[in-house]
Amino acid sequence: MLLAIDQVLTPDEVRHFRTHLDRAEWQDGAATAGSAARQVKHNQQIGAQDAVGLQLAEHLLRRLGETPQFVSAALPRRIYPPKFNRYAGGGQYGAHVDAAIMQLQGGQSLRTDLSATLFLSEPDEYEGGELEIEDAYGVQSAKLPAGDMLLYPATSLHRVTPVTAGARVAAFFWVESLVEDDRSRTLLYDLDQSIQELSATLSAQDPRVLKLMGIYHNLVRRWAAT
């Protein structure tokens, strides 16, 4: 499933993030890439222990928990703490697939089921910088408004095209879902959204709505890994 989620951050929150990030100390992004990705990764990132980056990441995690569409689509079990990157002066990230397993603090590991990019620059602030994702229907290209987020399978081959003018600033992170299979997650998301739409016109106690809710939760029980 490839899903754009509008206004995960409000315009005021985006301005707050950018105020801090524009003054931050950026490092060579290749330092955090694997051996293969290092050859095609040309961007900048905020250091893993940077106080500003950690504070903004915590803020974003809270907002994700308050975003019903994200919770419905991702069914998150664990979220890799958000990081921040910047592309400018021809910066790009060539075609790659994200690592399947990532290490968390405390010795835990995270299976990357979903990748996410939250745009923090408006599309007219930079040229190029499209996030291109290959799926069964070809190459999908995204360049979203600031505050919007793209959620997509981490198994996808994807790239960031060269930024030839301006700067593209974004947050990125990965999700381990309770439901590993992407097709199952997509069915659950579609079913949940249909229930929400019906609940807006019918009573939440309508037998038809209650039946669909029962089906939804029983499918989650069947497919979720605990």
Image (cartoon, helix red, strand yellow):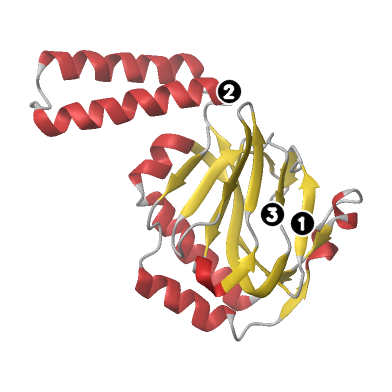
Q: What element carries label 2?
A: loop
Q: Is mark 3 on a helix, strand or loop?
A: loop
Pointers 2 and 1 in contact (C-beta within 8 Å): no
As measured in the structure, the alpha-carbon distance from the residue carrying label 3 to the one carrying label 1 is: 26 Å
Q: Name the spot of residue 197 as percent of width and height, x first.
A: 21, 31
Give the residue drawn at x 9%, y 26%.
202
Residue 181 marker: 2
Q: Name the spot of residue 31 as percent of width and height, x first.
A: 84, 64
Q: In this picture, is 148 found above or below 100? A: below
- Amino acid identity at mark 2: Asp
Q: Is mark 1 on a helix, strand or loop?
A: strand
Residue 105 marker: 3
Q: In this picture, is 172 found above or below 10? A: above
Residue 93 marker: 1
Mark 1 Cα-neighbour bin, 10 Å: few <14, some 14–19, many ≥20: many
- Amino acid identity at mark 1: Tyr
Give the residue drawn at x 40%, y 71%.
13
> Depth check: 121 or 99 in front?
121
Left or right placement of residue 180 versus residue 48 in this view: left
Q: Is residue 49 visible in this depiction of the protein?
A: no
Q: Name the spot of residue 165 as percent of width and height, x first.
A: 67, 75
Q: Name the spot of residue 17 as percent of width and height, x first.
A: 49, 75
As measured in the structure, the alpha-carbon distance from the residue carrying label 3 to the one carrying label 2 is: 25 Å
Mark 3 Cα-neighbour bin, 10 Å: few <14, some 14–19, many ≥20: few
Mark 2 Cα-neighbour bin, 10 Å: few <14, some 14–19, many ≥20: few
Pointers 3 and 1 in contact (C-beta within 8 Å): no
Give the residue drawn at x 57%, y 40%.
152
